[in-house]
Amino acid sequence: MQLLAIILYSTDGARRVVDFKPGALNVITGHSATGKSTLLDIFEYCTGRKTVLFPLGPMTDAVSWYAALFQMSKTRAFVARPAPGPGRKTTNRVMLKLGADLEALPYEDLAANTDRHTLRQQLSQIIGIAENHNHDTHGQDGIGTEAHLGHATLLCLQGQSEIADSNRLFHRQSDHHVAFALKQTLPYFLGAAPHDQARKHAQFTAARRRLKQAENNLSQAQRTNDTAQETLAALWHEAHALSLVSSPTPPDDHVQALETLHDAVQSRAEMPSAEYESQRTLELEQTCADLRDQLRTLAADRRLLLAETAAADDYSAAARIPRDRLASLGLIPSPADDDATTCVLCGSTLPEPDLTVATLRHSLHRLDRQLDGIDSIRPARRAALEAIEQRTARLRSQLNAAEHALQALAEGEAASGRLPYTDRSDFVRGRIHGMLTALQRNSGADLTRLRRARDTARAAVEALKSELDPEAERDQLLARLVPISRDITLWAHELQLEHGDGGVHLNLSRLTVEFDTQEGRHPLSRVGSGQNWVGYHVLSHLALHRYFVRQRRPVPRILFLDQPSQAWYASMTHDGDEQGHKDHLAAERLFRLIQEVVQELAPELQVIVCDHVNLPAPWFQETVVQNWRDSEKLVPAHWMDTTSPRSTHPEA
């Protein structure tokens, strides 16, 4: 995507066309206030920017439409947007027309046929910006930006106040939303983010949703199964109390217990006598009492273990203090057992035997043994606590089952006590049969299937997560910055910029260039001189576009530079001045380097420079496409003489 022309339409239909050469350096030179800088604003407006504040005056009073003619890879695109109405900063109305041999359209053919969002979408597709989604630098889910043409054009523009800014490297970077979008989308434009990233992120989101649903289903089934175990045990106790089953405890096999109970309620065995039921009820009550006693014993054992653990921890913490102090004895050589008359520090002979060191060593060894014993018993104590917890859980489940059975017997007695014997028997069997049917529907048969579904969903999430590894993406980004930084360093040496010899690095996490110095790495803001600021801005963007061209990345092949000579222009106007001569040579080196890069990449890169300078060198004059001097401007002066009232603007 390169620019063939920018077209302005007056309020009465007159047309002003500014032509450009694709694949070449285009210089628009001229005096101040001729409209050179506004070309950048018009380009941005015609590529879909929402708000553009054109300078008040002829540009806002005499222009009714702004248009641009682009050369795409296999076609041309004519884009026109009406001027915003009075008091408005923008309009969403856009005209887009595609065609192989398009030229600037006449005023009569202008008519909006789309909006700026569709414009960006269609132009993005034409230049090859695929579906994408870029997560933030910390990899947080749900936060990201999809790169489009608007983000790509941020890499193509350097306004007059930006090109010499030591604190900001990119267009509109002072807006924190724009800075965030640059950090998000630059990995995609550099090729560090995979081309199918958006599809993988969508798959990852869907896989995580399926995993969460599978986990919820399994958790609910497990809770139902746990409840079913207690219910089954309660039914078994109740059936035993009614002499439907002979064993007082159900078998461990869940399916076998269900089948046994089902056969029992299907049989026509007689109901037991009231005395038998009373005896079984008393046995069930005794079972509950025994279980409560066991739970109380386990609770006491647990409290004792916890108290011992706390005491051991307190003693260990207290014993480590003197042990750590005595540890310095390791620096003192151990004396012979029968030699207590020699100083262990200096080796001199003592008048009296000194057993202090031996006594201290004995204390150290004793503390070490005690602490080792405490540490060695920790796993056993922890295992004992876990065993108590597991035993307690089983007893509580058994107690709940027994209590539920007692409650069911009492409720059954209250509901069927006045019924005839046969009806009472059928009532009890029917109630147990109904509960068995519900248990069979919610049995543990589905747990294996649900666990398998959960494991499959988890494996899919892990597989996609590994493909979207942010660390791997960061490594890819750093690798792609190496040739870009190398170009900047090489060109900085050619332009004789400061700190270029030590190594220059493009840091996209901070959106600046950094320099290796003896004191460490420092950003552009720590470097003085407007010449360095302008130079590194131009070199950084040239290096980026050289990379975009060579790697065939979907970025417009346009670089707009506004007033790159501003750091030298003031002294260049002083004829015969030595500093002016040096600055003239420095500015010429910069323009010459731009020209060489464009020629190297021809016809894949178009650079448009708006500047006051007009170098006399023949090679420079060949690059001049517009020379706005002697009253020539972007907006013709006679347009103001025929300007219609503002109410004639399309947005009025």
Image (cartoon, rainbow, N blue to C red):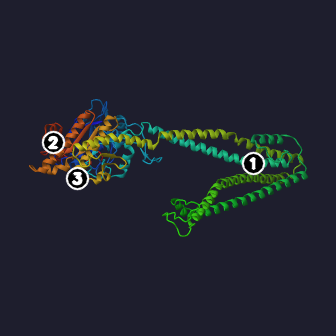
Amino acid type shown at disc 3: Ser
Is 444 above or below relative to 280? above
Q: Earlier in the sequence, mark 1 or mark 2?
A: 1
Q: CA distance from mark 1 to mark 2?
A: 94 Å
Q: CA distance from mark 3 to mark 1?
A: 84 Å
* Residue 92 visible in image: yes
Q: For mark 1, give the secondary structure.
A: helix
Amino acid type shown at disc 1: Thr
Give the quadrant of residue 26: top left
Q: Nearer the viewer, mark 1 or mark 2?
A: 1
Q: For mark 2, give the secondary structure.
A: strand
Amino acid type shown at disc 2: Asn
Q: Residues within 10 Å of mark 3 (few under 14, many from 20)?
A: few
Going 54% across and 43% down the picture, which residue do you hit? Answer: 208
Going 47% across and 42% down the picture, which residue do you hit? Answer: 469
Going 64% across and 61% down the picture, which residue do you hit? Answer: 312
* Residue 39 visible in image: no
Foreground residue, 442 or 379? 379
Q: Quadrant of the N terminus?
A: top left
- Residue that mark 1 sits on: 231
**From the viewer's perspective, is 275 left or right of 94?**
right
Give the quadrant of residue 357: bottom right
- How many discs mark residues in the rendered view? 3
Q: Which numbered disc covers residue 529? A: 3
